[in-house]
Amino acid sequence: MASAPGSSVRVRFCPSPTGNPHVGLVRTALFNWAYARHRGGTFVFRIEDTDAARDSEESYGQLLDAMRWLGFDWDEGPAAFDSASGAGGGPHAPYRQSQRMDLYKDVAEKLLAAGHAYRCYCSQEELDTRREAARAAGKPSGYDGHCRDLSAARVEEYQAQGRTPIVRFRMPDETITFTDLVRGELTFTPENVPDYGIVRANGAPLYTLVNPVDDALMEITHVLRGEDLLSSTPRQIALYKALIELGIAKEIPSFGHLPYVMGEGNKKLSKRDPESSLNLYRERGFLPEGLLNYLSLLGWSLSADQDIFTMDEMVAAFDIADVNPNPARFDLKKCEAINADHIRLLDVKEFTERCRPWLRAPFAPWAPEDFDEAKWQRIAPHAQTRLKVLSEITDNVDFLFLAEPAVDEASWAKAMKEGSDALLATAREKLEAADWSSPEALKEAVLAAGEVHGLKLGKAQAPVRVAVTGRTVGLPLFESLEILGKDEALTRIDAALARLTA
Ligand code: GLU
Ligand code: ZN
């Protein structure tokens, strides 16, 4: 870890613990993690919790849990990646900004002393009034530099009035150009980057200060983050130059801004959109590898003809220079299709285990003691090829563990037509006489019953399926019948017949 500056890659993922983790955040974490691993570098996990009003311990816990679930092993951070192995840490600990306040205070003092920052006494009303006037005159409406060079007398007067100043960073009067790793060369002129606040009037340091200060102190070499933060980059570069002058920073990191993720109706996917909540994807039974495979495609691709790949393959290939700057569209259908492919790629045993949460409360509608492990082991391989998300397993196998099938009324109406009672009666007879050790024989029985009533297999099996499983769609019928067993299957057909003839 102690290597010469510049020789090794250090990237960071530094979320604020507000609300639930969302997919945009996961994409940012993914690209940082993959880049660190690709370059054999260090992945730093830092918590930006300086906003006491919005940050929460619960959200912090969710972030740790999400990172572990996703498999983003970090090298330095507030806790260990493997929760069993105890506290985290690293050479730049602590990794929670709320525990680093003294450091920021110290840096702010140094910036003030060197003239890179100054105290601004303007009240909000004064700022607003002057902004309106600038707008009306067609001039840039950012902070106008009013307090840049206050005389000692002025300062005394403001203090006598009881004003409490904020600290502002003094932007140099120069054009700032940098080469974005995703977007190429970008230029910002001074009138578009006014002096900005770095410490609140109550002494609390702002994101604008703590984020670049920590990147400097933690010797971050590459800042990869969302495009929404692009406007803070010229300010941070100017701050970095001041930090280098003060001996606090070693070098300016490289920046790469990841493309926006668009949701429905071509609007930016917001963390408030329900479909962006990571918890939702976990509850629905996305595999972490499936979700990550899909999220990697939001701005990147492995190759033109390979959509499905493992995280190892991504790590081997990922370069930030290949990220596409154009907005990426979040397509839930494609996300599900990719997840389905990853479900199919699992070893059957692994699949059987990963479904467990959806076979128990609160997801499963059957009593725990009615779950039959042997039946589950037999049905699982038939289910594996049919699921988009693991939560679908519950409805697909509930007929095996419930005392009676959960009848979907729309399915009943669709399958039970005139003559269905006669058909079911014949099917029951043929099934009664069939060899129940072979799905093939059960199929022959239903086929034969259909022939008696002039129905093809598809039409003949629909009422049987609804009688036994409660639904028109599901796992292969004859395997399902075999696993359910003769007595139970015939009892269910009898119950359906009773309902039809009642
Ligand atoms: N805490 C910031 C955020 O969540 C991080 C910004 C950055 O990556 O520089 O937006
Ligand atoms: Zn001012």
Image: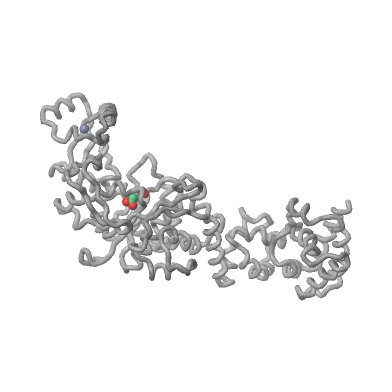
Q: 7 or 309: nearer the eye?
A: 309
Does residue 169 lie above or below 214 as drawn?
above
Q: Is residue 316 visible?
A: yes
Q: Residue at x 85, y 53 (%)?
A: 499
Q: 478 or 127: nearer the eye?
A: 127
Please identify the quadrant where the N terminus is shown.
Answer: bottom left
Q: Position of residue 327 (x, y in %)?
A: 41, 53
Q: Residue at x 25, y 29 (%)?
A: 137
Q: Quadrant of residue 412?
A: bottom right
Q: 202 or 86: nearer the eye?
A: 202
Q: Quadrant of residue 297?
A: bottom left
Q: Residue at x 24, y 54 (%)?
A: 178
Quarter containing ligand 2?
A: top left
Does residue 121 lie above or below 274 as drawn?
above
Q: Using residue 401 as the reference point, say whether residue 90 is left or right of it.
A: left
Q: Is residue 86 visible?
A: no
Q: Using residue 197 as the reference point, say whether residue 327 is left or right of it.
A: right
Q: Quadrant of residue 378?
A: bottom right
**Colour scheme used in the picture?**
one colour
Q: Position of residue 441 (x, y in %)?
A: 79, 74
Q: Position of residue 357 (x, y in %)?
A: 58, 59
Q: Residue furthest left?
A: 152
Q: Using residue 280 as the reference point, say whether residue 223 is left or right of it.
A: left
Q: Position of residue 272 (x, y in %)?
A: 47, 44
Q: Residue at x 35, y 56 (%)?
A: 13
Number of numbered discs on residues: 0
Q: Using residue 96 as the reference point, say whether residue 238 is left or right of it.
A: left
